[in-house]
Image: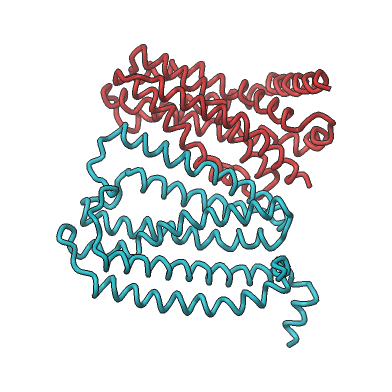
Chain colours: A red, B cyan
């Protein structure tokens, strides 16, 4: 039974990654959205290095939040439209685990690329080396929480009128703690303060989301498919 | 006495109808008494002048905004767990009043902040978390109105309300830490000077007035919700024929 559940999860992750590889434009759009949004800020506020250093953590993190949110529609949307989701719900494997697999695939295709390119964006804002490392680590810890919390919103708004904007209204307020501690860690690092506290809290939030979010998402999916 | 009798819309509808005028009456009487204390009986504050008098509206609204979210999440959870239609309708009925209270708290807070702090808005932990609470209410309301099937709307919004209820304390503490880390906050409303007794009484009277109003408004709204959902039921048709 456990082996079967593991195999099912691997199959779900593999399938989603394969779909992402075949439809590369979906993944790249989110990626370039992130890059473009971050690059717009210096044009809006001016190129003074001091100010850019100060706003960089917030800008990169807010852009990551928006990029994660924009990609949520893809998490269950296509599967819902073609009936795959219904089959997933009907399988004997626990839906919570399958949801976790889908969230993992979503993070690998949208969260991880942002994490990897973020130090480059930080360089544009003249962040020092330590802060760049903290930016990378904080995004690595925090972006899974964005995918997990976002999954609940995505599942609740499946097939609902005005889906995209509605998901944003539901999910963005719930992202606030992740933003506060993620950007807070980078700011603390840039000003020479300790970052362990911020990163620990960020990790705690990701772990809490790991426990509760797949369960709430599975419940929301069942409601959406009734 | 069987309390579950009133969990059925046909029996609850007339009961709510009988309760609404009482709570509305209490709200009006207590509101007038409270406003009299607030505007005439309470002395002028020696630090803040007359500007402080807005707290007689502000504080009850802020309390109700948070309390009503808990009430909403409670009924939403009951509705989700026991599949009782009326509980979900109660949750939907409480939400607009809660959003209204949050808005009043923010608005009056701005009016108080301008003369006292010299700014309409500061990114204080309480203000910020109250603003996010308003966003949570708005998210709940938009989800309810976006889903056409009422049963699905009940359940989906219940999950959102519960997720939000878990998040509210996390949001509050994160915003609090964020605030203390970013800017040494020069203003503090936690170290409020001890209040004169008459001010405290006035505030409590206003709290009960807001409480009674919230109950009356929610019950009125749930009555509309019941009629809307049960419009094809025999007992509603009988009401119309009477």
Dividing the picture into quarters, in which one does residue B27 lie? bottom left
Dividing the picture into quarters, in which one does residue B84 lie? bottom right
Q: Residue at x 71, y 20 (%)?
A: A22
Residue A96, image x and y in percent? 72, 32
Compared with A131, A223 (above or below) is below
Q: Residue at x 84, y 22 (%)?
A: A1
Front residue of B231/B226: it is B226
Q: Is residue A6 left or right of residue B138?
A: right
Which residue extends farthest left? Answer: B46
Dividing the picture into quarters, in which one does residue A181 lie? top left
Front residue of A2/A226: it is A2
How many numbered dots are placed on residues in this image?
0
Compared with A81, B109 (above or below) is below
Residue B46, image x and y in percent? 15, 61
Q: Residue at x 66, y 60 (%)?
A: B87
Compared with B164, B240 (above or below) is below
Residue A65, image x and y in percent? 50, 32
Front residue of A153/B55: it is B55
Compared with B36, B48 (above or below) is above
């Amino acid at each position: 039974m456990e082996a079967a559940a593991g195999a099912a999860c691997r199959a779900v992750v593999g399938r989603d990654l394969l779909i992402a590889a075949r439809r590369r434009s979906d993944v790249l759009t989110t990626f370039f959205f992130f890059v473009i949004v971050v690059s717009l800020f210096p044009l809006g506020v001016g190129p003074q290095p001091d100010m850019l250093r100060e706003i960089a953590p917030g800008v990169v993190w807010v852009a990551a939040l928006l990029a994660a949110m924009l990609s949520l529609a893809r998490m269950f949307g296509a599967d819902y439209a073609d009936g795959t989701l219904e089959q997933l719900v009907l399988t004997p494997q626990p839906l919570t685990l399958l949801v976790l697999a889908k969230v993992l695939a979503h993070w690998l295709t949208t969260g991880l690329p942002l994490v990897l390119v973020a130090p480059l964006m930080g360089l544009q804002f003249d962040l020092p080396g330590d802060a760049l490392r903290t930016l990378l680590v904080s995004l690595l810890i925090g972006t899974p929480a964005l995918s997990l919390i976002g999954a609940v919103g995505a599942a609740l708004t499946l097939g609902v009128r005005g889906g995209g904007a509605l998901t944003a209204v539901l999910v963005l307020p719930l992202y606030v703690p992740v933003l506060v501690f993620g950007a807070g860690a980078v700011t603390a690092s840039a000003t020479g303060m300790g970052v362990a506290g911020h990163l620990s809290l960020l990790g705690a939030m990701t772990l809490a989301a790991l426990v509760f979010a797949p369960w709430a998402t599975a419940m929301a999916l069942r409601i959406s498919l009734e | 006495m069987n309390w579950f009798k009133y969990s059925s819309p046909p029996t609850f509808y007339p009961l709510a109808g009988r309760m609404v005028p009482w709570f509305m009456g209490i709200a009006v009487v207590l509101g007038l008494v409270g406003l009299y204390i607030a505007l005439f009986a309470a002395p002028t504050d020696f630090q803040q002048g007359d500007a402080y008098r807005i707290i007689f509206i502000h504080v009850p609204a802020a309390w109700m905004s948070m309390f009503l979210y808990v009430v909403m999440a409670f009924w939403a959870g009951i509705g989700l767990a026991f599949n009782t239609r009326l509980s979900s309708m109660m949750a939907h009925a409480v939400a607009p009043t809660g959003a209204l209270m949050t808005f009043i708290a923010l608005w009056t807070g701005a009016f108080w902040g301008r003369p006292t702090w010299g700014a309409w808005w500061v990114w204080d932990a309480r203000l910020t978390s109250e603003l996010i609470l308003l966003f949570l209410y708005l998210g709940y309301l938009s989800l309810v109105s976006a889903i056409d099937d009422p049963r699905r709307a009940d359940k989906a919004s219940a999950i959102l309300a519960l997720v939000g209820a878990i998040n509210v304390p996390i949001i509050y503490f994160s915003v609090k830490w964020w605030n203390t880390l970013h800017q040494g906050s020069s203003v503090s409303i936690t170290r409020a000077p001890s209040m004169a007794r008459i001010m405290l009484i006035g505030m409590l009277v206003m709290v009960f007035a807001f409480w009674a109003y919230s109950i009356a408004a929610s019950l009125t709204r749930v009555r509309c919700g019941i009629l809307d959902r049960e419009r094809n039921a025999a007992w509603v048709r009988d009401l119309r024929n009477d």
